[in-house]
Image (cartoon, coloured by chain):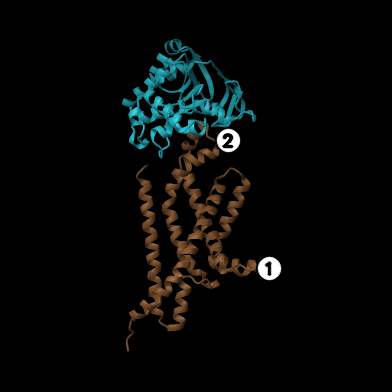
Amino acid sequence: MGFQFKYSVVWESVPILLVGVKLTLLLTFFGLLIGFFLGTAAGLGKTSRSRILNKIAGFYIESIRGTPLMVQVMFIYFGLPMALNTRIPPLVAGAVAIALNSGAYIAEIVRGAIQSIDKGQTEAGRSIGLTRFQALLYVIWPQAFKRMIPPLGNQFIISLKDTSLLVVIGVGELTRTGQEIIAVNFRAFEVWTSVALIYLVMTLSLSKVLSFTEKKLEIRA
Amino acid sequence: MIKIKELHKSFGPLEVLKGIDLHIKPGEVVVIIGPSGSGKSTLLRCINRLEETTSGTIIVDGYDINDTSTNINFIRSETGMVFQQFNLFPHMTALRNVTLGPVKVRKVSRTEANKIGMELLVRVGLEDKANAYPDQLSGGQKQRVAIARSLALNPKVMLFDEPTSALDPELVGEVLEVMKTLATDGMTMVVVSHEMGFAREVADRAIFMDDGVVVEENTPETFFMRPQNERTKAFLRMVL
């Protein structure tokens, strides 16, 4: 008896999986939104002349990059609440984990992009009397941001896929939903194929949006 | 306008400026020449504090620029600087480059700033390039926009750091022309340059720097025709 791919399983699973997709997108969106702010702050901290800001940003980046996301997730969901004697909803814990994690990588993207802008740009800005902050805001940031887009896109895709790790804390995102369907119908092949394809559709769409944005900004030097 | 006293500047163990004394009067055009590594660009960059001085004082328009009570951003807005590499903001049109200072530093309205900006672009002969981006301009045009950008703040002094050294030879003239007009209009100018023709024709004083000190200074005629110092003579022989 050969294995038979049952298309009916796919059609039955997809509507249920789409419920998980909603959570996956929600987690990705908020995780990256907060992560972008964290990363910008930490990236600027790393380029700042203040030694304290430098150290704080460095500590954050190194401690996140140096530990597995899985451990961070469990630390935030199981560990922290025990120490603080509270409970954190899984969804919040998940979004926080994605935010903290992506923030550390985004910080390095921001730092790299800012440092790649020619020093003469800052000097020209300062020489017309702009403050350090104004020169960053009006002269450096717009140029650096353009350079950030490709690596940011990469990080966005990684973070989207990373939300699948949140199965360990029981967040009902796409991967978890897939597991639950299999627990009922035992059709692992069809369900994981469907799950994988849905991830692929999401990441490909994200790539498309990003390359479109890049082209839009490309029009002007 | 500018008073420099006993100025020393070191980068680590390397002493680049070894005690410079220099007075520049309002409306004076001073050209500084000298071999590369003589410290002339560093001297210029110290005047608007793009480089921190190691010791000595610099007074610009009555303000000690190294005094902590001096608002350096204000001094810089009164001291225009033109760079060898233009350093135009590539993400802004020519007009935006010129108006950034008036809008953000002088807090002038956008309409007013555009008016100032267009007047200046006319002055440097680039009114038709107002909406062009830097990568659509030639080197000479870029440098003229950069000059307009500095002038937009109505500075009391203009510093030029080898403004024509990065230009193709046929584009040098248009930039020097703008600088000549500025000089004629009475702008105080400090120009680091190897344009001997410009120095002879426009400068009130020529200064020769070598190895971190002012070796010789004189009126251009005397400076070029009868240089006194051996090092000046040797340098002029090489470049003329």
Which colour denotes chain A? brown
Q: Residues within 10 Å of mark 1 (few under 14, many from 20)?
A: few
The residue positioned 47% from the left and 47% from the top of the image is: A113
Q: Residue A158 placed where, x, y %?
A: 45, 62
In the picture provided, is B66 more to the left or to the right than A182? right
The disc labelled 1 sits on which kind of residue? Asn
Name the mark nearer the viewer: 2 or 1: 1
The disc labelled 2 sits on which kind of residue? Gly
Residue at numbered disc 2:
B12
Residue B164 appears in the figure: no
Outermost bottom residue: A1
Q: Residues within 10 Å of mark 2 (few under 14, many from 20)?
A: few
In the picture provided, is B10 more to the left or to the right than B123? right
Q: Residue B192 placed where, x, y %?
A: 46, 23
Residue A157 appears in the figure: yes
Colour cyan, chain:
B
From what the image shows, is residue A217 above or below residue A170?
Answer: above
Chain bearing tag 2 is B
Q: Residue B225 placed where, x, y %?
A: 42, 11
Label 2 to label 1: alpha-carbon separation = 54 Å
Residue at numbered disc 1:
A85
From what the image shows, is residue B130 above or below residue A187?
Answer: above
Find residue A76 and report its image quarter.
Answer: bottom right
Q: Secondary structure at mark 1?
A: loop
Q: Nearer the viewer, residue A188 or A172?
A: A172
Q: Nearer the viewer, residue A68 or B137?
A: B137
Chain bearing tag 1 is A
In the picture provided, is B97 more to the left or to the right than A61? left
Where the C terminus of chain B falls, by quadrant? top left
The residue positioned 48% from the left and 67% from the top of the image is: A23
From what the image shows, is residue A218 above or below residue B207?
Answer: below
